Image: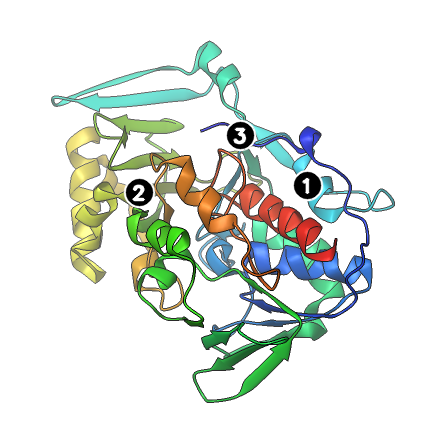
Amino acid sequence: MNACSEDSETPITAGDFDGSVLIVGAGAAGMATGYLLQQLGIDFQIVEADTTYGGRFRTNNEFTDFPIPLGAEWLHVSAEELPAIINDDQITVDTVLLPYSENDTSGYYSNGQLTIEAVGNAVNDDQDKKFIGSSWFDFFDTYIVPSIRNRMQFNTQIATIDYSGSKVIASDAEGQFYEADKIVVTVPLKLLQLGTVNFTPELPTNKQNAIADATVWSGIKIFLKFSEAFYPTFLYFDDSETNEGQRLYYDAAYGQNSADHILGLFSVGKQAEVYQQFSGDALRDYVLNELDEIFEGKASAVFQDILVQNWNDQAFAQAAYLADEAPSSISRRMAESVANKLYFAGCSYTQFADWSSVHTASRSARDAVRELVR
């Protein structure tokens, strides 16, 4: 996929629209949409099915002494994406980001053999940056949430959306109705596949086909705390990146001001489903056995604690994201608006050849708002 560039974007300016907007979902796209509408002085409300905001980039602050990103973790594009999200030249971004170094180590385990070498020049092909002392969630919590928090309503799962009349009318699982001139749907693609939202009239055939045809990857993240670090910056396998999924062990404490040693496991698609067969002690033992085989028993010897986020078990996600190898037509069709009243924004609803990250969700929100207000 090609990382989107803010350079190609046009400024977001007020248009002729001065009605009300209902935003379904308080993840990255939902919050970014509300924030931009707030800047434009447009009336809006955000309804979120879960108990709080954050979607798939929530953070754990108890496992160690720095934030652990349970979902989205890295910035995959230029740091200029952060001020692009804020959309206000008067605000200075204090978020600290750290790129990887050519001196970092990369391990490769194949056929029972572990090879470790310096990342070297390969680091120049990788824009990934770690948040230091913060996370994607903290960035939104600091710069986006304060101006929209009073417009959020939680524990509100939208079940129906009727856009057949002059107004859009949505109802939640408790039978409460919400009316607006336009609606922005940021519900995860997996939930649309599962039919959790019923539309009246039905969505256009091309959008229904996109929903049905989409491969949405399973997802799990596991964090292990050890009394010492015995692993490289990255650990790859033969199946670390395939058409069916990905898995990668990595130093989750990289660059943090911490004495703790935290190894992360990121896995999506078929590779994630291997780990998702287990839970509790069985999952812990499976992962430690895998690492013991690679590092000659070291993992179990210095193991201290484990933290697991299985996104398939999260009621209002039930998966990770649209597969990296999906046709770009899927996300493009999902991003198309319907009847000048129904709009879609989210990491899988993009008008460009990139998806499944916070920066793509945020840009999709900008695209939706530009179209909505004109």
Q: At label 2, which amino acid type do we have? A: Ser
Q: Quadrant of the N terminus?
A: top left
What crowding class fits label 3: few (fewer than 14 Cα within 10 Å), some (14-19), or many (20 or more)? some
What crowding class fits label 2: few (fewer than 14 Cα within 10 Å), some (14-19), or many (20 or more)? many
Give the mark nearest the N terminus, 2 or 1.
Answer: 1
**Residue beneath label 2, please?**
267
In the rendered image, residue 79, in percent from the top left (x then y), is placed at 66, 33
When the figure is inspected, residue 187 is found, relative to residue 228, above or below; the finding is: below
Quadrant of residue 245 within the rendered picture:
top left
In the rendered image, residue 132, in percent from the top left (x then y), is placed at 60, 40
When the figure is inspected, residue 293 is found, relative to residue 144, above or below; the finding is: above
Quadrant of residue 190 within the rendered picture:
bottom left
Q: Which mark is residue 3?
A: 3
Q: At label 3, which amino acid type do we have? A: Ala
Pick the front one: 81 or 267 = 81
Q: At label 1, which amino acid type do we have? A: Leu
Q: CA distance from mark 3 to mark 1?
A: 15 Å
Mark in front: 2 vs 3: 3
Pick the front one: 18 or 185 = 18
Quadrant of residue 107 within the rendered picture:
top left
Q: Residue at x 49, y 33 (%)?
A: 353
Mark in front: 3 vs 1: 3
**Residue beneath label 1, please?**
82
Secondary structure of the residue carrying numbered label 3 = loop
Secondary structure of the residue carrying numbered label 1 = helix
Secondary structure of the residue carrying numbered label 2 = strand
Q: CA distance from mark 2 to mark 3?
A: 21 Å
